[in-house]
Image (spheres, rainbow, N blue to C red):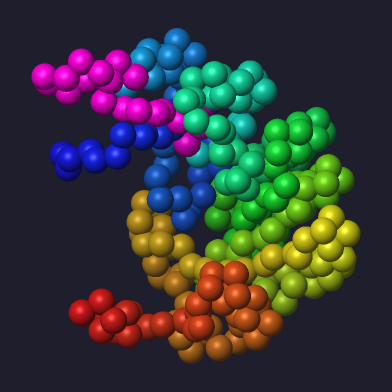
Amino acid sequence: MPLIEPRQIGLAFDMFGCPNRCRHCYIGRQPNEKLSEEDVRWAVDQFRGFTQSGEDSPFFESINVVTWNRDPDYSDDYKRLYELEVELSDTKTYRAEWELLSIWRLARDERYAPWAHGIGVRTCQITFFGIGETHDWFCRRPGAFQDCLTATERLLDAGIKPHWQLFLTRKMIPELGELLGLVDKLRLRERVAALGGEFTIFLHTPGPEGEARFIEHLRPTIEEAKSIPAELVAASEKHIGVERLWKTVGERVIEIL
């Protein structure tokens, strides 16, 4: 095991799991095994009380705790779990800055988005893999695409700016025009501007790890990427902060060497 240098540590507990089994997930297809509050408290105590041999004071100066590892608020008791995170953490909660909420819960709980706004969330990322059945296939869950649209509306109603990230594959390329059409149809640029922000939409490809190793055959070639709308490429380069979005494996190998 490598030496742990920082005296601060973050602990993430997958207490309730995730409603999806996305084909790009770096974690893989994990079962939803529940952890109790007592389990989490016990584990945090082990880290908090850890001392190095020959020392009297605890090794870790501060601990930050989150009660999820995949879907932020899959549990119906999400408010209580958030309070548990605040209680067990030595530092402030970073939930508002991470821009992550449960899309599944946004689509099912009308009180969730206002609650998220109340804890400081002002922007939330929503992931798309395509339109309709294409998106549902990637999430391995029927109705997942409609959940994203419902979540977008509920975020805006609560004063939270949605931004859309698109995971680019060969399946998505033919549907990019329709996705951009949805942005116009839903007036996302105008509605986000009314909240004092700029609507963000960008794309990138899945990393070849975890479940995504099994969809490498869907990675677009440079030639296929030429059909992507120029406005979407420009928006992605701006968001990611790069001058050029696409590079071949050969070009990257040369850079690394």
Whole-percent x, y for residue 200 in the image: 69, 65
Which corner quadrant holds the C terminus?
A: bottom left
Q: Is residue 62 magenta?
A: yes
Q: Is residue 249 above or below residue 141?
A: below
Q: Is residue 194 left or right of residue 70?
A: right
Residue situated in front as seen by the camera: 227 or 163: 163
Task: State whether the magenta stretch is mostly helix, strand or loop.
Answer: loop
Q: Is residue 231 left or right of residue 239?
A: right
Query: Residue shown at 61%/25% (left/top)?
Result: 82
Whether residue 19 is visible: no
Number of marks in the rendered image: 0
Furthest-left residue in this view:
54
Q: Is residue 210 magenta?
A: no
Q: Quadrant of residue 134?
A: bottom right
Q: Is residue 92 above or below residue 244?
A: above
Query: Residue shown at 40%/28% (left/top)?
Result: 62
Q: Is residue 244 above or below residue 178?
A: below
Residue situated in front as seen by the camera: 83 or 136: 83
Furthest-top residue in this view:
38
Whole-percent x, y for residue 247 in the image: 41, 82
